[in-house]
Amino acid sequence: MDIGVLTVPFGDQPLDETCEYLAGLGVDTVELGCGGSPGNDHLAREEYLDDEDAQADLHDLLDEHDLRISALATHNNPIHPDDDQAETADEELREAIELAAQLGVDTVTTFSGLPGGGPNDEVPNWITAPWPTEHKEAHDYQWGVAEEYWTDLADFADDHGVNVGIEMHPNMLVYEPTGMERLREATNDRIGANFDPSHLYWQGIDVPAAIRYLGDAIHHAHAKDTGLYESNARVKGHLDTTPYTEEEDRSWLFRTVGYGHGESHWKEVVSTLRMVGYDGALSIEHEDSLTSSREGLEKAVDVLDRAVFETTPGDAYWAE
């Protein structure tokens, strides 16, 4: 299993400097943003798509530092009720899939997106309860929109031999494992999870159980922790709209790996991923407001370095 990094926090410095720094930490893979909320500081699609020379230069740079690309990232909302926003997100996603295929990268990470609650809505509507009944009707409408879009997109991904790893994220239609499985069953096996535990912790989801539930539907994984602050949650629960920068008043915060859940938990996460057959990258996504990107990343690498397995399992001689 590889230790990887989503390079977004280093977007203000050139990719070659970022690769040199990450390689020095012992990182194995990089996840490169090429659109949507991750931006495209390190992989502008218009500069690389259909340009074999530019792609060769990128591979040479990565080879120089013994790094590989685990995934291309373009997180946006391709089923947004605003047609212009949806079309932009769809173009980003399809071009990311095309570029991934050209680069020999097998996964693009993204969101499921979220429609409005009806055909005349102007903003997305995250529905979390079936009552009053118009909410159930709106949720059914949203799934109809999603299944139509993602069926077509899944065929497009299959034509290019690329998996789509959807990050289960609140304020998106797919935010937990049963929704992920529903979308996968409605489309094809190219649609799966970019398994990010940070969004599951504060929903009260057992992360190892979620890994077991999804199994081979996990196409990619993020290493990102969450701290739960029960003194605040006891008053207002975990659905918390307090700004992320007002840390002491929030019920939960994104944390560096090991600062929300201990090293033993992350060893269980790694072991459970191996049990279900995932042996790809654990791509560190730094969004901890209590530490700098570099320090947070270095501490995450330190924890994961002790948690990941570097070798394949041997024969179970003791079972013979």
Image: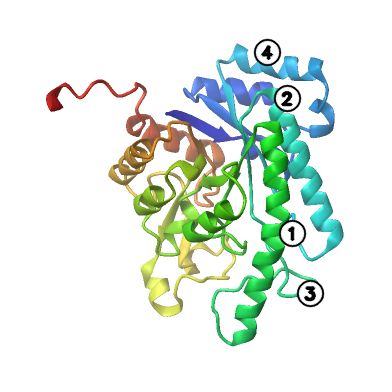
Query: Image quadrant for the C terminus?
Result: top left
Measured Cα–Cα span from mark 2 to mark 3: 37 Å
At 55% from the left and 80% from the top, the residue drawn is 130
Q: Amino acid at mark 2?
A: Gln
Q: Name the one closer to the observer, 99 or 159.
A: 159
The reply to whether callout 4 and callout 2 are in contact (CB within 8 Å) is no
Q: Front-most of 245 and 309?
A: 309
* Badge nearest the viewer, 4 or 2: 2
Which badge, 1 or 4, comes first in the chain's sequence? 4
**For mark 4, does the 10 Å Cα neighbourhood hold few (<14), some (14 to 19), or many (20 or more) residues?**
few
Q: Position of residue 103 (x, y in %)?
A: 69, 24
Q: Which residue type does callout 4 highlight?
A: Asp
**Disc 1 from disc 4: Cα separation:** 36 Å
Which mark identifies residue 121?
3
Residue picked out by circle 4: 60
Q: Residue at x 46, y 30 (%)?
A: 3
Residue highlighted by disc 2: 102
Viewer-proximal residue among 255 and 80: 80
The image quarter in which residue 142 lies: bottom right
Rounded to the nearest angstrom, the CA distance separating label 1 from label 2 is 26 Å
Picture disc at residue 79: 1
Please identify the quarter of the rendering in which residue 104 is found.
top right
Asked if residue 253 is positioned above or below residue 91 in the image, the reply reads below
Does the CB distance between marks 2 and 3 fall below 8 Å?
no
Q: Can you tell which of label 3 and label 4 is closer to the viewer?
A: 3
Asked whether the viewer can see residue 89, the reply is yes
Disc 4/disc 2 C-alpha distance (Å): 15 Å
Q: Earlier in the sequence, mark 4 or mark 2?
A: 4
Q: CA distance from mark 3 to mark 1?
A: 12 Å
Callout 3: few (<14), some (14-19), or many (20+) C-alpha neighbours within 10 Å?
Answer: few
Q: Residue 89: x, y in percent?
A: 77, 50
Where is residue 154? Give x, y as percent.
67, 45
